[in-house]
């Protein structure tokens, strides 16, 4: 199934109404980039998608195995550096905290599965971005 996103860009700053046809959020750029900072930046949204996929995967695997867990929280930090010819190199630090009475093996399995979530694999995979 294809994922579709529609963007309606507003005249103020870089504000955009982002919709998947069922839900909407506001995107923008920080003030330093001449935006109004009233919504997530594009890089925020990419990182948020990765974070959500990781924590949802942890919960999915825990439920599948009947492991009792509480909150699952993640902190992700992204650093992007410019290399030769403008090529970007991105580094993401991930810290996931899982509440619950888990063995070391269970916790390790949940973290391993988080690294195999769909968005993580998608980001590491091949991309073909074409104009329609």
Image (spheres, grey):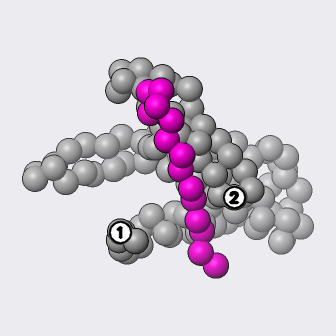
Callout 2–callout 1 Cβ contact below 8 Å: no
- Is 130 in front, or is 120? 130
Q: How many marks?
A: 2
Residue located at (74% from left, 46% from top): 72
**Chain part drawn in magenta:** 1-14
Q: Indicate the position of residue 114 as horizontal and vertical percent values.
A: 62, 61
Q: Indicate the position of residue 49 as horizontal and vertical percent values.
A: 58, 53
Q: Which mark is residue 105?
A: none
Q: Is residue 74 left or right of residue 85?
A: right
- Magenta-span inclusion, residue 8: yes
Q: On screen, 60 above or below 44?
A: below
Q: Indicate the position of residue 127 as horizontal and vertical percent values.
A: 38, 71
Q: Secondary structure at mark 2?
A: loop
- Residue for badge 1: 131
Q: Residue furthest front?
A: 11
- Is 127 in front, or is 104? 127
- As measured in the structure, the alpha-carbon distance from the residue carrying label 2 to the one carrying label 1 is 21 Å
Q: On screen, 8 above or below 66?
A: above
Whether residue 66 is visible, yes or no, is yes
Q: Which mark is residue 21?
A: 2
Q: Earlier in the sequence, mark 2 or mark 1?
A: 2
Q: On screen, 15 above or below 131?
A: above
- Magenta-span inclusion, residue 49: no
Q: Indicate the position of residue 28 as horizontal and vertical percent values.
A: 49, 34
Q: Residues within 10 Å of mark 2 (few under 14, many from 20)?
A: few
Q: Is residue 130 left or right of residue 81?
A: right
Residue 125, by quadrant, is bottom left
Q: Residue furthest left?
A: 85
């Amino acid at each position: 199934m294809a994922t579709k996103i529609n963007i309606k860009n507003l005249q103020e700053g870089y504000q955009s109404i982002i919709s998947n046809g069922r839900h909407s959020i506001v995107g923008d750029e920080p003030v330093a980039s001449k935006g109004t900072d009233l919504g997530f930046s594009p890089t925020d949204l990419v990182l948020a998608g990765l974070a959500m996929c990781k924590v949802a995967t942890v919960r999915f695997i825990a439920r599948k195995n009947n492991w009792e867990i509480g909150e699952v929280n993640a902190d992700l930090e992204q650093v992007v550096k410019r290399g030769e010819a403008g090529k970007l190199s991105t580094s993401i630090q991930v810290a996931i905290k899982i509440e619950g009475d888990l063995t070391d093996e269970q916790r390790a399995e949940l973290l391993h599965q988080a690294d195999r979530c769909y968005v993580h694999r998608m980001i590491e995979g091949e991309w073909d971005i074409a104009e329609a």
